């Protein structure tokens, strides 16, 4: 049981790191993208990644302190832990930007798709657990990553073919301007 708990905590730490890296990358992309629709899309993804981190941090805190998973509803509604979990300190010199100033919009989208794919694959694998609360968490996050990947992929394809940003209100209506 102790080994199972340790493994679950390791997976949660890895998941938090993936969400942190995605969050950072989306912030950078929102800063450097000049297209208003692109900025809105990346800012919305920043918010999604923050929500995912909060859920994962709540699960981590509960599992680490009690040895038990909490339900998705509780993880979503609970206030985040006060101290942000610091994971895998970066190697010296590796704390810089994920994107560079000359990263194109298409390159940023490709990098974002890579983040989402990596997260999706990790969550899919992690969902192969017998714990129902853990399964619900990982399946929810896999679905979220898949939605993000699909949006990014459609945008990438449209931008590479048409030269302008795709803004699909049916896919992600909260990207629309208020």
Image: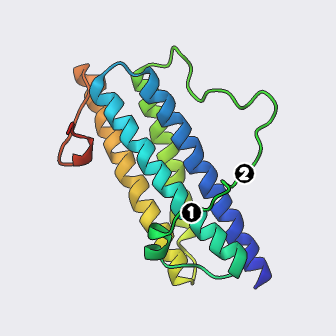
Q: Residue at x 48, y 49 (%)?
A: 49
Where is residue 151 drawn, in percent x and y? 31, 43
Question: Residue at image x 71%, y 64%?
Answer: 10
Left/right placement of residue 51 relative to residue 122 reads left
> For the residue labelled by badge 2, is the local secondary structure a helix, a strand or a loop?
loop
| Viewer-proximal residue among 7 and 160 | 7
Q: Mark 1 points at which residue?
A: 56
* Visible residue check, residue 156: no
Up the image or down, 47 lies above or below 134; here it is above
Residue 56 image-quadrant placement: bottom right
In-image side of 35 versus 5 (left or right): left
The residue that appears at 45% across and 42% down in the rendered structure is 46
Instruction: Identify the secondary structure beneath mark 1.
Output: helix
Residue at the outermost right position: 92
Decide which of tag 1 and tag 2 comes sooner along the chain. 1
List the residue tagged with mark 2. Answer: 87
- Residue 54 can be seen in this image: yes
Residue 178: x, y in percent? 20, 39
**Residue 55 spot, x, y in % from top left:** 52, 63
Task: Give the x, y percent position of residue 68.
Answer: 64, 82
């Amino acid at each position: 049981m102790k080994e199972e708990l340790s493994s679950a905590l390791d997976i949660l730490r890895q998941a938090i790191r993936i969400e942190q890296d995605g969050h950072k990358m989306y912030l950078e992309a929102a800063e450097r993208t000049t297209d208003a629709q692109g900025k809105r899309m990346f800012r919305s993804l920043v918010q999604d990644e923050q929500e995912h981190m909060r859920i994962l941090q709540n699960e981590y805190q509960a599992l680490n302190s009690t040895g038990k998973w909490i339900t998705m509803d509780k993880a979503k509604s609970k206030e985040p832990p006060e101290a942000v979990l610091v994971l895998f300190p970066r190697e010296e010199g590796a704390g810089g930007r994920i994107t560079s100033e000359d990263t194109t919009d298409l390159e940023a989208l490709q990098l974002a798709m890579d983040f989402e794919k990596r997260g999706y694959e990790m969550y899919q694998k992690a969902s192969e657990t017998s714990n129902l609360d853990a399964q619900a968490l990982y399946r929810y996050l896999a679905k979220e990553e898949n939605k993000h990947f699909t949006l990014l992929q459609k945008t990438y394809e449209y931008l590479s073919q048409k030269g302008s940003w795709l803004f699909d209100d049916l896919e992600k209506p909260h990207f629309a301007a208020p």
